[in-house]
């Protein structure tokens, strides 16, 4: 079962009604077309490499966090599954990449694949419980999973490093050529490429018949089985995919920083993720990226000005967005686009 959020323009795709004579294939094809704004968005993402060379370490962290936020948006924005423990899968990916690197295999690409697989396994095992509960029970179960994961990692200090963190991580050069430098150039390009690839995969997923059925389940989980949609199996599939993507994000963090700590599993990381999605807007994919960028940049700048109370300003920003842009910042910007330029 799922948590059914309120219908908002940002959280829902343009209305689809079979009774209105809309061809599902034409509808999905229209949604899948890339707009000029999307192309410009990704071209702009390349600019920091040339224009902001001293901020590439921050830019790489933004790309990694955006990928993590994207993984949550898949289940929250499209399937209606709310989670306060999504950092579990991020942490599994982070520790998997760190452990295999520490003990002899630091090749980054295969490390991402192995980490994604490990996170997907954990996601699959937990999905049997997640998709069967809703509302407060779902929140409490995901929160509890996060606490359990932190304690398990802490108790396995012989493997994870416990409270001291996982040290000795050694990431090899990408394809044996591009080493990770102190300025973050390689890390940024690497993280951005991985983000783009998984964004394209996620975009294709949500604009497929499978993605359309997820939105149907989110809107009315009772009626969907009546038209032949197996709710639980589909929710489990997207949950496992989301966990795998979160695992890749965690692996990227460990590979680019060569360190992993209990913080990667903590509640604070999951809570920050929810803030990012509220800021950017759920159910649009780009909302996850924009929300992550705004949050990370604000944290970096505000923490320099006021290290103790920077979260106060984040809270004010969050309240302003909820009050004046309930669809999120991306949803608000989308309303400014002329109707003739919008997707059908």
Image: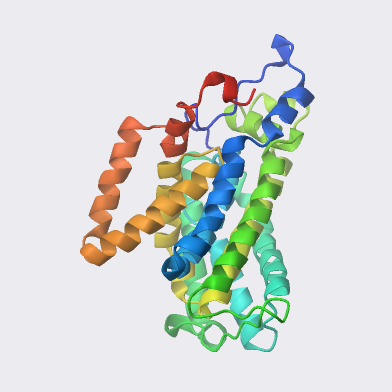
Q: Nearer the viewer, residue 28 or 52?
A: 52
177 lies left or right of 64: right
Numbered-mark total: 0
What is the x, y in percent for residue 282?
A: 50, 39
Structure colour scheme: rainbow
**The C terminus lies in which quarter of the figure?**
top right
The answer to whether residue 73 is above or below residue 196 is above
Residue occupying the point 25% across, 59% down: 310
29 lies left or right of 191: right
The answer to whether residue 39 is above or below residue 157 is above
Residue occupying the point 42% across, 42% down: 278
Q: Nearer the viewer, residue 81 or 179?
A: 179
What is the x, y in percent for residue 174?
A: 68, 76
What is the x, y in percent for residue 61?
A: 48, 65
Residue occupying the point 52% across, 32% down: 11
21 lies left or right of 5: right
Residue occupying the point 61% across, 57% down: 195
Query: Residue 4, can we see it?
Result: yes
Query: Residue 92, can we see it?
Result: no
The answer to whether residue 313 is above or below residue 215 is below
What is the x, y in percent for residue 90?
A: 55, 64
**The N terminus lies in which quarter of the figure?**
top right
Which residue sits furthest front?
50
């Amino acid at each position: 079962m799922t948590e059914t959020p309120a219908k908002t323009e940002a959280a829902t795709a343009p209305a689809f009604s079979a009774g209105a004579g809309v061809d599902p294939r034409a509808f999905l094809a229209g949604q899948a077309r890339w707009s000029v704004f999307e192309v410009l968005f990704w071209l702009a993402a390349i600019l920091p490499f040339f224009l902001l060379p001293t901020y590439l370490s921050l830019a790489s962290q933004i790309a990694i966090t955006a990928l993590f936020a994207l993984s949550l948006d898949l289940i929250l924005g499209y399937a209606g599954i709310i989670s306060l423990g999504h950092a579990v899968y991020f942490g599994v990916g982070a520790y998997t990449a760190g452990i295999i690197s520490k003990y002899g295999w630091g090749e980054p690409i295969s490390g991402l694949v192995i980490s994604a697989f490990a996170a997907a396994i954990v996601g699959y095992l937990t999905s049997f419980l997640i998709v069967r509960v809703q509302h407060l029970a779902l929140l409490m179960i995901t929160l509890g999973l996060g606490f359990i994961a932190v304690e398990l990692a802490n108790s396995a200090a012989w493997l994870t490093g416990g409270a001291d963190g996982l040290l000795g991580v050694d990431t090899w050069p990408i394809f044996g050529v591009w080493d990770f430098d102190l300025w973050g150039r390689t890390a940024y390009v690497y993280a951005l490429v991985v983000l783009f690839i998984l964004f394209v995969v996620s975009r294709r997923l949500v604009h497929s018949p499978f993605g359309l059925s997820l939105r149907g389940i989110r809107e009315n989980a009772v009626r969907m089985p009546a038209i032949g949609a197996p709710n639980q199996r589909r929710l489990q599939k997207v949950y496992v995919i989301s966990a795998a993507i979160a695992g890749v994000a965690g692996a990227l963090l460990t590979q680019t920083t060569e360190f992993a700590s209990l913080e990667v599993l903590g509640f604070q990381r999951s809570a920050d993720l929810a803030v990012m999605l509220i800021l950017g807007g759920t159910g649009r994919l780009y909302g996850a990226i924009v929300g992550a960028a705004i949050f990370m940049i604000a944290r970096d700048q505000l923490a320099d000005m006021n290290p103790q109370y920077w979260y106060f300003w984040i809270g004010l920003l969050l309240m302003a967005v909820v009050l004046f842009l309930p669809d999120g910042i991306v949803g608000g910007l989308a309303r400014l686009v002329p109707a003739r330029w919008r997707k059908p």
